Image (cartoon, rainbow, N blue to C red):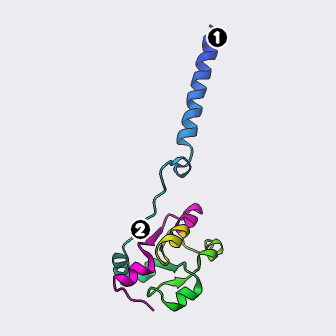
Amino acid sequence: MNERIKYIFIVSATFLLTLVLIYGTPLRYTDLLEPKIKDVDPSVFYQKYSQNPDKYVFIDVRPLEAYKNIHAKGSVSKPLHTLYDERHTLPKDDKEIILICSGGRASGVGFFYLQHYGFTNISRVEGGIENWIEKGLPTE
């Protein structure tokens, strides 16, 4: 009888440990599919941004020289390499953070970087400044 109780205990403990490991691990570490970026159409975003700019932090992650050359109206320059320090001052709840770059790659890197540090209020402008200009949206 003692052996049977030991066996039931080991099976139960193994089952419970398996459940904890599977369901207790954050999804991003167990997700075997490619992580998804939340993209926003530039025209849709600009319409919302124009109506309520205080609801957003619109960040251009390109190098400062590219930003000075041309940038989306309303965006602020925070080059990708500065996000390490900027993450301490960016809002995590009350505003939506929108990232833009040249074509979408750098802002994608910024998206995952901020997501890694717990930001859930982030999106990326689909196609970057190139798509922004193509859609005829205002630049400075």
**Structural distance between the alpha carbons of marks 1 and 2:** 58 Å
Range of residues picked out in magenta: 111-140
Secondary element under disc 2, as helix, strand or loop, is strand
Mark 1 crowd level (few <14, some 14–19, many ≥20, 10 Å Cα): few
For residue 86, side relative to residue 137 (left or right): right
Looking at the picture, how far across and down is residue 91, in whole percent?
54, 72
Mark 2 crowd level (few <14, some 14–19, many ≥20, 10 Å Cα): some
Residue behind mark 1: 3
Q: Determine the image quadrant of residue 68.
A: bottom right
For residue 90, side relative to residue 58 (left or right): right
Q: Determine the image quadrant of residue 64.
A: bottom right
Looking at the picture, how far across and down is residue 78, in whole percent?
58, 80
- Tag of residue 39: 2
Secondary element under disc 1, as helix, strand or loop, is helix
Q: Residue at x 41, y 72 (%)?
A: 126
Q: Residue at x 59, y 75 (%)?
A: 80
Dot 1 or dot 2: first in sequence order is 1
> In the rendered view, would you say 52 is above or below 31?
below
Tell whether position 132 is magenta. Answer: yes
* Relative depth, front residue between 9 and 62: 62
**Three-letter code, disc 2:** Asp
Image quarter (top left, top right, bottom left or bottom right) of the N terminus: top right
Instruction: Please tell me whether mark 1 or mark 2 is closer to you in this view.
Output: 2
For residue 10, side relative to residue 48 (left or right): right
Q: Determine the image quadrant of residue 2.
A: top right
Image quarter (top left, top right, bottom left or bottom right) of the C terminus: bottom left
- Tag of residue 79: none
